[in-house]
Image (cartoon, helix red, strand yellow):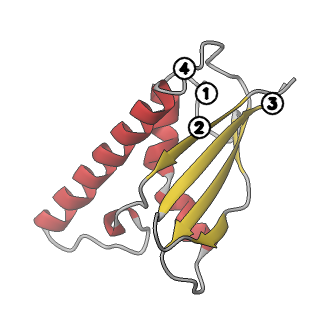
Amino acid sequence: MNETVTIILPLPSKYLSPNYKPYSRGGAIAKSRATRSYRSLARKAAVETGVESGPWNKVKAYPVFFHKMNRKRDDINHAQMLKPAFDGVVDAGIAVDDSSEYWKTQEVQFFTDKASPRVELTIERVL
């Protein structure tokens, strides 16, 4: 029996994009703040799921993005924007680590939801 949890997060900040280049001290600070904030949000959401059987040794992560507008999206960039969220899930004690030995991120999916843009991150325990 595989266990799963889903956490819902706001869309990541533009500062978390791998395409964002902090050319100033202020830009680097903004990126650092965005990283800490998103990691903290993910940790809180993961703790609120109430998983007591963690930390799980092997997991699969299924990221689903809901944007306001339907347009072309770069799935690799979007997956990389979730790195702080993955760290937050580990901080919450659901997964052992987010390295490739323990954590497999599945294909990123995109949908449109004008009323509620968000990320739904489903973590599945693999036995």
Choose top left, top right, bottom left or bottom right for residue 70. bottom right
The residue identified by callout 4 is 50
Amino acid type assigned to the residue bearing label 2 in the image: Asp
Rendering quarter of residue 74: bottom right
Q: In x, y percent, where is residue 15?
A: 32, 65
- Please name the amino acid that badge 3 sits on: Val
Q: Circle 2 — which element?
A: loop
Residue under the point 63% across and 54% down: 63
Mark 1 crowdedness (10 Å alpha carbons): few <14, some 14-19, many ≥20: many
Q: Are marks 1 and 2 in contact (CB under 8 Å)?
A: yes
| Distance between the alpha carbons at the discs numbered 1 and 2 | 7 Å
| Residue beneath disc 3 | 126
What is the crowding at mark 2: few (fewer than 14 residues within 10 Å), some, or many (at least 20)?
Answer: some
**Amino acid type of disc 4?**
Gly
- Above or below — where is 28 with respect to 123? below
Residue 111 % position (x, y):
63, 71
Q: Is residue 4 left or right of residue 98?
A: right
Label 1: state its secondary structure: loop
Tag shown at residue 104: none
The numbered disc on residue 95 is 1
**Residue nearest the viewer, comparing 79 with 119:** 119
Question: Mark 3 or mark 2: which comes first in sequence?
Answer: 2
Q: Residue furthest top?
A: 52
The secondary element bearing badge 4 is classed as: loop
Could you tell whether 15 is left or right of 106 in the image?
Answer: left
Mark 1 or 2, closer to the camera: 1
Mark earlier in primary sequence (4, 1): 4
Please state, as top left, top right, bottom left or bottom right, where the C terminus lies in the image: top right
Measure how far apart labels 4 and 3 are at the Cα level.
Answer: 18 Å
Residue 98 disc label: 2
